[in-house]
Amino acid sequence: SAPEPYSPTGAPTDGDRGRSAQRGAYLTTAQGNRPYDSDHSLKAGRRGPVLLQDHHLREKITHFDHERIPERVVHARGAAAHGVFRGYGSAEQITKAAFLGEDVETPVFVRFSTVLGSRGSADAVRDTRGFATKFYTTEGVFDLVGNNIPVFFIQDAIKFPDVVHAAKPHPDREIPQAQSAHDTFWDFVTLHTEATHHTLWNMSDRGIPRSYRTMEGFGVHTFRMVNARGETTLVKFHWKPKLGIHSLVWEEAQISNGMDPDFHRRDLADAIEAGAFPEWELGVQTFPDNEEQSFEGIDLLDPTNIVPEELAPVQPIGLLTLNANPTNFFAETEQVAFHPGHLVPGIDITDDPLLAGRLFSYIDTQITRLGGPNFAQLPINRPHAPVNDMLRDGMHQTAVHRGTAPYRPNSLDGGCPFLAGRDEGAYIEVPVDLPAAKKERGAPASFDDHFSQPRRFWLSMTPVEREHIIGAYTFELNKCHETAIKQRALQVLANIDAELCQGVARGLGLAAPDPDRPLAAVEPSPALSQLGRQWPVE
Ligand code: HEM
């Protein structure tokens, strides 16, 4: 047959599709050799020892031995779908991103996930959900790597390993719901009170969505949009589900986890297969790009804060429709690699210190998870725009690069017409003035208020939603072993609202702390403060 067509742009070709699918009328080895029997090893006589020279046997088993790759360090369990995004054109005033133009259609791949469970864990657990979208735009890939909760646990990426260590299964028993895991999670979120807001959302009905199809999504961080005139606007991204926002009640979640741990995965795939394509509207809240990067007193660089929609309404800018299930879970859902730094012209980052750490973390983890630096060549990660980079070689290189040494400009290599002008390309650094500053660790004073927004969230709840929140805190905290941690959690709740605190205290059989007692009076238990000073080595 004809040789595989070579694709210098990296775009999938018929040859690529053929390579990943099964071609030809008969079974072959990886080398295209046709075995006459794939069910019996080569032996010395029918009952004799198996012979090492049986390459077909060795190839089959060796490949099988390497079928699994490491699961994601977080967001390991997920489900995904293909779809299309159509821009409304309404964002053209604030961004030059081509895919947001009127009626521009862009293929997308969206992966939903839980954060903490392993690949084989249940769907309807109380957790944050990931909502990651890969837009294959004509200007290259744009990834919006968001969650279904608009705020995050921490304000600084340096704490991310800590919060995940506190919440993941413990090293001794690897039991996610063990008492020890509850102790460490609640220890972390009560010692780092910036986590109060996210935790409250988790304990609300938002922590147990009815379906991926009925979840909101949020970019969480503030991003910066740049229009054709070079003017900038700060924005927060929102996905609004057309089906509305719906949650399970706790008892439903428990039953679902027992009877159908694949509840959300099945729901998404079944709906798409039945032609009930889920839709979300993408919207932005917009804020003037002022020197303080704050809006109505809210620090826009603090990812534990929202901006209430009453103050900045969400303006619709496009429609997402998921219309096709993956053909192969591993090749697509498992191998997809999102990155918050995959940006197109017209969308830029801000100085949110959490986002800064994410920009480093995703590619770093993917080099391990996907076996080297060339995972952008995997079919699901390939841009649908021409690729002409200067990256060469490395593990799992599948491109056959031509030309002389990759450097630019290069007078031996036929010139280099492809560098965009400064006004056209991606990664244009918006010239933002930086204040004269000393190098130091620490957070700005504007990151200090950890309770007003949780209080507002609580006060916006209906009586039945409040009952659910009290029930969730009571259930989860009752699994903690250390009374000191439960008491500290009650002190945090007292700082949100007295009714909430008293309700949970009743459920725990503990006295509600004095709401006026300042939180700073809460000390870590002696055992924990010792751990903080020095890890005991025995
Ligand atoms: C996945 C790190 C905060 C949303 C991941 C992964 C890492 C990571 C290492 C696994 C990626 C992979 O293996 O491909 C971090 C760090 C954070 C952080 C260091 C903070 C410093 C956030 C925030 C959001 C978020 C604030 C939401 C706005 C996601 C999503 C995924 C993910 C949706 C799953 C992507 C997928 O479906 O493949 N994160 N993350 N993360 N993260 Fe984060």
Image (spheres, helix red, strand yellow):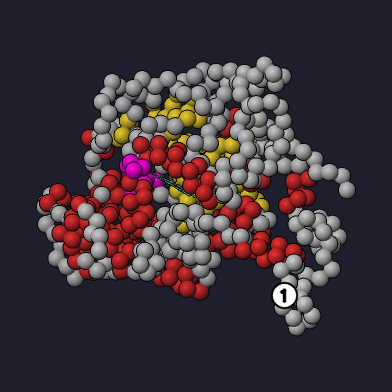
Residue 86 image point, x, y percent: 61, 38
From what the image shows, is residue 484 above or below residue 290?
below
User: Residue sitting at 36 percent across and 50 percent down?
Assistant: 161
The residue that appears at 19% across and 71% down in the rendered structure is: 509
**What are the residue bounds of the magenta stretch?**
150-158
Q: Quadrant of the C terminus?
A: bottom left
Q: Is the CB of the residue bearing disc 1 within 8 angstroms of ligand 1?
A: no
Q: In this view, does 354 lie to the left or right of 217?
A: left
Task: Identify residue type, mark 1.
Answer: Val
Residue at the image position 72 percent from the left and 78 percent from the top: 49
Secondary structure mainly formed by the magenta segment: loop
- Residue topped by disc 1: 50
The residue positioned farthest toward the bottom in the image shown: 47
Where in the figure is residue 464, as x and y percent of width and height? 33, 62
Q: How crowded is mark 1: few (under 14 residues within 10 Å), some or many (20 or more)?
A: some
Left or right: 432 with respect to 380?
Answer: left
User: How many numbered marks appear?
Assistant: 1
Kindly state the secondary structure of the residue where label 1 is placed. Answer: loop
Which percent across, then down, holds residue 103? 64, 34
Q: In the image, residue 308 lies at what x, y percent?
A: 35, 40
Q: Please give left or right for residue 534 compared with residue 415 in the image.
A: left
Magenta residue check for 200 = no
Nearer-the-camera pick, 524 or 221: 524
Query: Do we see residue 286 in this rendering?
Result: no
| Above or below: residue 99 compared with residue 35 | above
Q: Is any part of residue 109 visible from this angle?
A: yes
Question: In the visual, does 249 lie left or right of 229?
Answer: left
- 165 and 392: which is toward the camera: 392
- 108 or 55: nearer the viewer: 55
Q: Is residue 152 magenta?
A: yes
